[in-house]
Image (cartoon, helix red, strand yellow):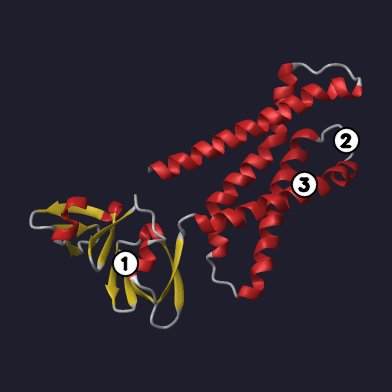
């Protein structure tokens, strides 16, 4: 697991812990604020975990898989449909989880009436935050030309990239595609810890390097041979 992934996991764990802590403190203060009997710490922690579980799960799934929905290549006029689906998915997880874990003593209709507005608002805020944050992340999918149309390939499945004038040849172990872009422009969107430039016209996926040979030769996972130029030899 690379450093970037570890950082994301660390941020997610910290955010999840903070949410549970806030919910727990809210439960502790509820009795004092309403004049009801004080709630024990263990009960407050249990409530905090149950109340937060759906949000923690929804956030994790949104970050991990939300990009696949955006990578389907739907027309731009359907972008609002994508966003609505994301909000609906988050709402289903959070409200469903909270209902399952906490609504045992409350009539279902009354529970949904009370909780739905807040869940809808916060689900929308979560998706908006995700959509604003996502452009600053390296893309997970790349839209390429197949010769008869377009398709999307996972960035991690790319073996190497080779410049070809105003195009880039995108090579995977299975086949090659074409991308209308320059190698220099594409390089800016790639994670530097995952992709390495080995030649003025070639970038390789570090994870796909199977063997390093003398004379500046790399053997990739599919058996493809890539030559390293002297200018980039120290990086390999």
Q: Is residue 144 left or right of residue 116?
A: left
Question: Measuring 58% from the left and 48% from the top, which residue is drawn there?
Answer: 61
Nearer-the-camera pick, 154 or 17: 17
**Element carrying mark 3:** helix
Circle 2 packing at 10 Å, graded few (<14), some (14-19), many (20+), is few
- Name the quadrant of the N terminus: top left
Residue 106 numbered mark, or none:
2
Relative image position of residue 173 (x, y in whole percent):
30, 64
**Element carrying mark 2:** loop
Which residue corresponds to mark 1?
Answer: 174
Question: Measuring 59% from the left and 51% from the top, which residue is drawn there?
Answer: 62
Distance of label 2 from label 1 (alpha carbons)? 55 Å
Q: Residue furthest bottom?
A: 148
| Discs 2, 1 touching: Cβ within 8 Å | no
Circle 1 packing at 10 Å, graded few (<14), some (14-19), many (20+), is few
Nearer-the-camera pick, 195 or 177: 195
């Amino acid at each position: 697991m690379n450093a970037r992934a570890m950082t994301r996991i660390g941020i997610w764990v910290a955010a999840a812990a903070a949410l549970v802590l806030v919910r727990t403190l809210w439960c502790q203060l509820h009795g004092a604020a309403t004049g009801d009997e004080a709630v024990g710490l263990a009960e407050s922690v249990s409530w905090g975990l149950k109340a937060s579980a759906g949000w923690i799960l929804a956030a994790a799934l949104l970050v991990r898989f939300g990009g696949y929905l955006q990578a389907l290549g739907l027309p731009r006029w359907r972008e609002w449909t994508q966003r609505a689906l994301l909000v609906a998915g988050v709402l289903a997880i959070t409200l469903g989880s909270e209902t399952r874990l906490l609504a045992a003593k409350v009539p279902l209709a009354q529970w949904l009436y009370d909780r739905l507005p807040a869940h809808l608002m916060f689900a929308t805020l979560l998706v908006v935050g995700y959509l604003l944050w996502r452009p600053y992340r390296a893309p997970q999918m790349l839209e390429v030309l197949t010769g008869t149309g377009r398709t999307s390939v996972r960035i991690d499945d790319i073996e190497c990239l080779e410049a070809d004038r105003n195009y880039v040849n995108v090579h995977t172990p299975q086949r090659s595609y074409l991308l209308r872009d320059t190698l220099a422009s594409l390089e800016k969107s790639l994670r530097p810890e995952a992709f390495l430039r080995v030649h003025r016209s070639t970038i390789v996926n570090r994870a796909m390097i199977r063997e390093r040979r003398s004379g500046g030769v790399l053997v990739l996972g599919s058996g493809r041979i890539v030559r390293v130029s002297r200018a980039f030899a120290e990086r390999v």
